[in-house]
Image: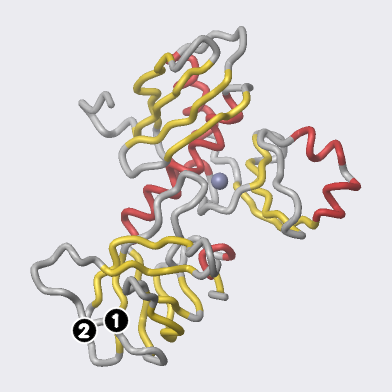
Amino acid sequence: MTIELFREDAYLKECEATVMAVTERGGIVLDQTVFYPTGGGQPGDSGILIPADGRRLRIASTVYDRDSGAIVHVPDDSGEVGQDLPAVGTAVKAVIDWDRRYRHMRMHTALHLLCAVVPCGVTGGQIGVEKSRLDFDIGEQTLDKEEITAQLNDLVARDISVSANWISDEQLDRNPDLVRTMSVAPPRGAGRVRLIKVGEDVDLQPCGGTHVKRTSEIGPLRVSKIENKGKRNRRVNIVFADQAGRDQ
Ligand SMILES: [Zn+2]
């Protein structure tokens, strides 16, 4: 199993690692990594692996291997010449594309705020570097673009702290009130679950993604579009407000 350094510290941009395996399809498994694998609506990280000989192996994405549970670094094979893969046992420096990841962290945390602002069940979501979305089952409610934008920016401006902690299934069972206050029900059976808390009472939910430490890091947001996805379902799209001219 790969040690998931990004889980304890989302701000780590690089780490030393050792190649543990190369999969049949050319994916690279390390003993530890700062690369976040695709999951929970957040795209996997891209970046580079640098062996001691100084070559730079471009990584296009990172995924979980469903069968083994390993984190697989997928080399970029979009170039004209294939990249040589490092042998098992090779020491590498693993460096993520931080600009892209940091935007994912800001967007991801913004979606937690959106959960807090729209008090409806979430049915889906996707995080991107330019826009992100959550799908809500709104029931009889109506949603207002400007109002949600204002509430999101208020939470950003309040510079609220975002923290993570692990809690066991037993602790969850002993605290039904805790589960009731979560905006998304925790998964059971893994033994423990990671909770992300925004402020004391803004948002609490189980989440394995990467987040910023304070809401001010997100920066100004704007609801770009609310799409009608059926009688009860609405898709709320958000963008960074400094992206002038973008309406998607
Ligand atoms: Zn999250």
Residue carrying label 1: 50
Do tag 1 and tag 2 residues touch (Cβ < 8 Å)?
yes
Residue 191 horizontal side relative to residue 140, left or right: right
Instruction: Pinpoint residue 210: horizontal percent, then vertical percent.
Output: 51, 54
Determine the residue positioned at 33% across, 67% down.
74
Q: Residues within 10 Å of mark 1 (few under 14, many from 20)?
A: some
Residue 213 versus residue 78 in the image, above or below: above
What kind of residue is marked 1?
Ile
From the top left corner, tell me how far across and down residue 185 is, in percent: 71, 38
The residue sitting at 20% across, 66% down in the picture is 77
On residue 244, which mark appears?
none
Which of the two labelled residues, at mark 1 and mark 2, occupies the earlier sequence position? 1
State the residue at coordinates (26%, 33%): 243
Residue 196 versus residue 184 in the image, above or below: below
| Residue 156 pos. (x, y %) | 50, 35
Q: Amino acid at mark 2?
A: Arg
Q: Considering the image in quadrants, where does the C terminus appear?
A: top left
Q: Nearer the viewer, residue 25 or 151?
A: 25
Q: Which residue is mark 2?
A: 55
| Residue 176 vertical placement versus 63 (above, below) | above
Q: Residue 150: x and y, percent? A: 47, 20
Q: Residue furthest right?
A: 174
In the rendered image, which quarter contains the N terminus?
bottom right
**Residue 162 placement, left or right of 85:** right
Q: Quadrant of residue 94?
A: bottom left
Colouring scheme, one of rainbow, by chain, secondary structure, one colour: secondary structure
Spatial CA span between label 1 and label 2:
6 Å
